[in-house]
Amino acid sequence: MILFVFPSTSHNFQSLTGKFTIYESSHIYFFTKKLTERKRISYAELMLNSTRIRRKKMRKNFLRYELLHIRIVEKLILHLVFVL
């Protein structure tokens, strides 16, 4: 699996598999190993399912919010990778 991200505003994340960057107002492109199929998802779509959870946690301290944000993004990325 190869991940290409085309930038705008960046967010750096540390995952179990290493560091990766997600960019706001951009699209994340997932390519299969053969590079014949391509899937695309926008940063906004990626965040859509986590909005309600993040709003609740924003009332708590900023560090906790950031850690939750990273975990949600990481889970969504891993889900997309396994779906392909």
Image (cartoon, rainbow, N blue to C red):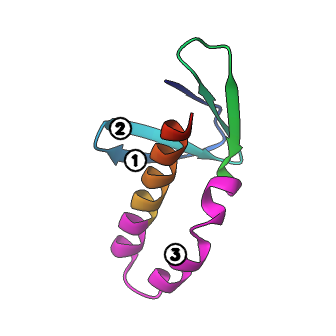
Bounds of the magenta segment? 44-68
Q: Give the number of the disc on residue 54.
A: 3
The amino acid type of the residue labelled 3 equals Arg
* Alpha carbon distance from label 1 to label 3: 17 Å
Instruction: Pick the residue in front: 8 or 78.
Output: 78
Cβ atoms under marks 1 and 3 closer than 8 Å: no
For the residues bearing labels 2 and 3, Cβ distance under 8 angstroms: no
User: What is the distance, in whole Å, between disc 2 and disc 1 at their CAs?
Assistant: 6 Å
- Above or below: residue 52 compared with residue 77: below
Which mark is in front, 1 or 3?
Answer: 3
Which quadrant of the structure image shows residue 35?
top right
Q: Which mark is residue 19?
A: 2
Label 3: how many Cα within 10 Å (few below 14, some 14–19, many 20+): some
Report how far apart the C-alphas of labels 2 and 3 lie in the structure: 22 Å
Q: Position of residue 31 (x, y in %)?
A: 60, 23
Q: The C terminus is located in which quarter?
A: top right
Amino acid type assigned to the residue bearing label 2 in the image = Lys
Q: Is residue 44 above or below residue 15?
A: below
Q: Are marks 2 and 1 in contact (CB under 8 Å)?
A: yes
At x 55% / y 43%, what residue is drawn?
A: 80
Q: Secondary structure at mark 1?
A: strand
Name the residue that disc number 1 marks.
13
> In this orientation, which residue lies closer to the viewer: 13 or 15?
15
Residue 60 image-quadrant placement: bottom left
Mark 1 is on which residue type? Phe
Specify which label sits upstream in the sequence, 1 or 3. 1
